[in-house]
């Protein structure tokens, strides 16, 4: 913190630069987290998260796309998520785990939820 204060005192433009990247970084982080859960089923532990199996994304981000699997077995090591999915894939299909084709941060590019998923989401929201 001291370093940032000193740099801000030495050059006020540094604060503008820092705040800009801090704001956009937090915004992108929130967007990523939102699409990791958008369309998940809070009533089914196996379907709490939303997964994506894009190979490049998962390879680059330590298999972060296996998010439903992570919620199902949160203590599982990231190197075991693909194996876990192979073991529980039929259970996931039965529970209706949402899978998107794009990385989570690009979830807004994915088609909207199906009508049945939208109805389930509306039922789970509190009234008022």
Image (tube, rainbow, N blue to C red):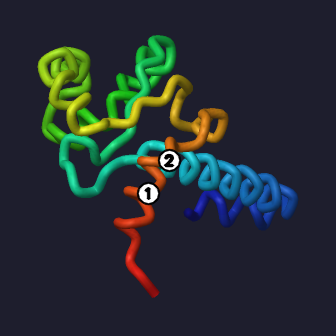
* Secondary structure under the numbered disc 1 in the rendered image: helix
Which residue, given by chain and number where applicable, does mark 2 sit on? 115
Q: Residue at x 69, y 63 (%)?
A: 6
- Picture quadrant where residue 120 is located: bottom left
* Secondary structure under the numbered disc 2 in the rendered image: helix
Q: Left of 109 or right of it: where is 101?
A: left
Neighbor class of circle 2 (other Cα within 10 Å; few <14, some 14-19, many 20+) is few
Quadrant containing the N terminus in the rendered view:
bottom right
Q: Position of residue 13 (x, y in %)?
A: 87, 58
Q: Position of residue 76 (x, y in %)?
A: 15, 32
Q: Left of 65 or right of it: where is 100?
A: right
Q: Residue at x 62, y 47 (%)?
A: 28
**What distance separates the C-alpha of mark 2 from that of mark 1?**
6 Å
Residue 92 vs 41, above or below: the answer is above
Which residue, given by chain and number where applicable, does mark 1 sit on? 119
Given residues 4 and 84, the one toward you in this image is 84
Q: Left of 23 or right of it: where is 37?
A: left
Q: Left of 12 or right of it: where is 78?
A: left
In the image, farthest residue toward the bottom: 128
């Amino acid at each position: 913190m001291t370093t940032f204060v000193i740099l801000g005192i030495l050059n006020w433009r540094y604060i503008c630069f820092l705040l800009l990247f801090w704001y956009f970084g937090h915004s992108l982080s929130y967007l990523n987290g939102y699409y990791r859960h958008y369309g998940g089923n809070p009533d089914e532990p196996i379907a709490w998260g939303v997964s994506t199996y894009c190979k490049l994304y998962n390879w680059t981000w330590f298999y972060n796309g296996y998010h439903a699997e992570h919620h199902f077995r949160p203590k599982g090591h990231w190197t075991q998520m693909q194996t876990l999915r192979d073991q529980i894939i039929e259970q996931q299909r039965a529970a209706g785990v949402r899978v998107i084709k794009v990385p989570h941060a690009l979830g807004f590019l994915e088609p909207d939820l199906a009508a049945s998923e939208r109805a389930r989401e509306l039922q789970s929201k509190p009234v008022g």
